[in-house]
Image: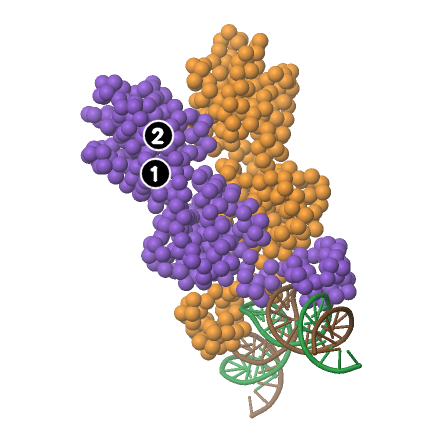
Chain colours: A purple, B orange, C green, D brown
Amino acid sequence: MADVAERAGVSTSTVSRTLRGLSTVSPEVRARVERAARELNFAVSRQAASLVTGKTGNVAVLVPTLDAWFMGAALSSLGPLLRSAGMELSVYLIPDMAERISFFDRLPARRNADALLVFSFDLNDKETARLDDLGMPVIYVSQHVDGRPSVYVDDVAAAAAGTRHLLNLGHRRIAFLHTVGASGFSFSSNERLLGYQQALTEAGIPVDEDLMAGIHTRDKRSTAEALGNLLSLREPPTAVFAEQDEVAVAALWTLRRTRIPVPERMSVLGFDDQPLADWFDLSTVAQSPKDIGREAGELALSLINEPDAADRCRHIVLPTYVIPRSTTAPPPAEEGEPRVSG
Amino acid sequence: MADVAERAGVSTSTVSRTLRGLSTVSPEVRARVERAARELNFAVSRQAASLVTGKTGNVAVLVPTLDAWFMGAALSSLGPLLRSAGMELSVYLIPDMAERISFFDRLPARRNADALLVFSFDLNDKETARLDDLGMPVIYVSQHVDGRPSVYVDDVAAAAAGTRHLLNLGHRRIAFLHTVGASGFSFSSNERLLGYQQALTEAGIPVDEDLMAGIHTRDKRSTAEALGNLLSLREPPTAVFAEQDEVAVAALWTLRRTRIPVPERMSVLGFDDQPLADWFDLSTVAQSPKDIGREAGELALSLINEPDAADRCRHIVLPTYVIPRSTTAPPPAEEGEPRVSG
DNA sequence: TTCCTCCGTGACAGCGCTGTCACGCGAGGG
DNA sequence: CCCTCGCGTGACAGCGCTGTCACGGAGGAA
């Protein structure tokens, strides 16, 4: 910066003021400084600046994985948003328990970010408390914690809506494919199961353990086995509600293979509305990770700029939509007169 | 840090030495300092440290998107690797041309990272030159630039191998589904097309323009249209080689819908070996983004630690494998006596 | 004219660390 | 017994910025 100052014939103070866009610089000096900076290919050091201002210009995100569609989509809207606010994005990828423990033990994000976005973790109280004294705004994304800013969809309501869609079509035996062991999504997962159960109960249909199967994502055998079990029940289901589109598509594939016509003999409903769902014309419950990412980013920026604002613990709940495509229809006639609605 | 020093009854120098793990600290003092640091919940400020050392402790990655399977997988191995080396990961997401221009104009990564990994961009000479005087090692990933360190698979050879697999099965009319307009992957895309053409030429089969179709990913109609064209040719193909698994799966789905049996009437070969490919039992040409990410990360770390090492412009070429699954088989008999091999 | 104000600018301290150098002390050799 | 050596420690400057304050000069009010 001293070089720029010398070249422009001004002090470093003036260079600093110019480069930060402060208004108390005369246009002519400003032009000179900007030219000098460009000629010398100069960029201010964030490190040095942050040492003085206390702001790092960084936003950290804590994610369990980047493999999942949800993360990619959410970060795709978050990244450009932060950049346009002049912020950098630091990613802390915590794929397993060992990394998780080490993260919460050492909290490497401390002092190295102005805000932290925690994605899709099912944190325990101790971990949440640890984040509380991180000294920066912490925003919970795709999950919610009382008294802390959170951005999420209401998975319970969404799953209940999906279930009601099937109920309204006339289904009475509805299976639920529950994902287990997928790193980082147990929070949503549990809520979706709950929503399914709530909707059934509300409709006066008993929750049947036999109709709920645990699936290991990324293991296609697991889906085939679960479907095999369901199809060999004394009273098999007429519809399958999968907690994730990937699982729904795997189910679709298995069903087509065994020549069970979808949706004539079996309805299939997914959750998420990934591009995958559109390809397979899969009926699904849609959420928008792009919107979630954007809202979370905006909330982060607002909390950074005014840490004492009223929305210090605001909850932003984003909508979901049931999207009927070609894989859901009324059950076969012998199952009872189908009702037409929803 | 002064607080820790006071609490431990030592100087800040000693605290610094202890926390950096330097050996010239007596065990007893080390223990005292570590306890004090833990009690005060102290973490060193990277900003301040980097001001002195000139090292930021950051590795920046430049990516065109995070939606793609490739990026997620590559970063999944890169992230933990960097963390275990005590480095942070900064992501620069450049989804469109405007962001790209602005990135190369302002080079925000300058002075804020110790190395830059450029993923899957097809950079022009000017952009490459701009990165050259960034003052840090720049590693090209999933692409290659002469004289610069690069980590990639040989897409030409891989596509040629895939094509030969189909040729060896006896196919003579092989279509190629070429992806166009997918942000950030044009480099690989072009090389794969080239490999397809090379293998055909080598086998003495003329390259037929009619057999090469451009597909827009994430637009299922585009695949259906392309297949429609291919199936209505005077001499339709007996095999389809898609440059990406996603497109191959879309093709598979369209073919199953139209009751064209795969692989009996039509073979389908993908490229990438995403989890998707395994689900659909799709034959494919496999690459391993995890390995690519890991190699790139290791190369970055080694260039950071010894910038003048011999591998300043090393090219690391990772292997690919043709994985035959259930979607490739010899063509129908009327097409000529199938040869059995490959 | 004199005083005051205000705008644009420069000088300088200091943010929190690290690297260097100097110092004290006990051990070992002459 | 003295000198040297080396280990463990402390003092201090300085990394590249920003924020504060002081200062000079132009312009308006008294």
Q: Residue at the location (70% across, 51% down)? A: B133
Q: Secondary structure at mark 1?
A: helix
Please tell me which of labels 1 and 2 falls first in the chain.
Answer: 1
Image mark count: 2
Residue nearest the viewer, comparing A282 with D26: D26
Vertical comparison of A268 with B108: above or below: above
Q: Which mark is residue A158?
A: 1
Vertical comparison of C9 with B305: above or below: below
Residue A278 visible somewhere in the drawing:
yes
Residue nearest the viewer, comparing B50 with B312: B50
Q: Secondary structure at mark 2?
A: strand
Which chain is home to disc 2?
A: A
Which corner quadrant holds the C terminus of chain A?
top left
Crowding near the residue tagged with mark 1, few <14, some 14–19, many ≥20 C-alpha atoms within 10 Å? many
Vertical comparison of A42 with B14: above or below: above
Q: Residue B315, percent across and down?
A: 63, 41
Q: Residue at the location (62% across, 43% down)? A: B99
Residue nearest the viewer, comparing B3 with B221: B221
Q: Amino acid at mark 1?
A: Ala
Answer left or right for C9 relative to B226: right
Q: Amino acid at mark 2?
A: Leu
Q: Residue B68, percent across and down?
A: 51, 37
Crowding near the residue tagged with mark 2, few <14, some 14–19, many ≥20 C-alpha atoms within 10 Å? many
Q: Nearer the viewer, mark 1 or mark 2?
A: 1
Answer left or right for A90 relative to A332: right
Disc 1 with disc 2 on a shared chain: yes
The answer to the question of whether label 1 and label 2 lie on touching residues, with beta carbons closer than 8 A, is: no
Q: Residue B196, percent across and down?
A: 60, 24
Q: Which residue is mark 2?
A: A269
Which corner quadrant holds the N terminus of chain A?
bottom right
Q: Disc 1 to disc 2, how far (Cα)?
A: 12 Å
Residue nearest the viewer, comparing C20 with B183: B183
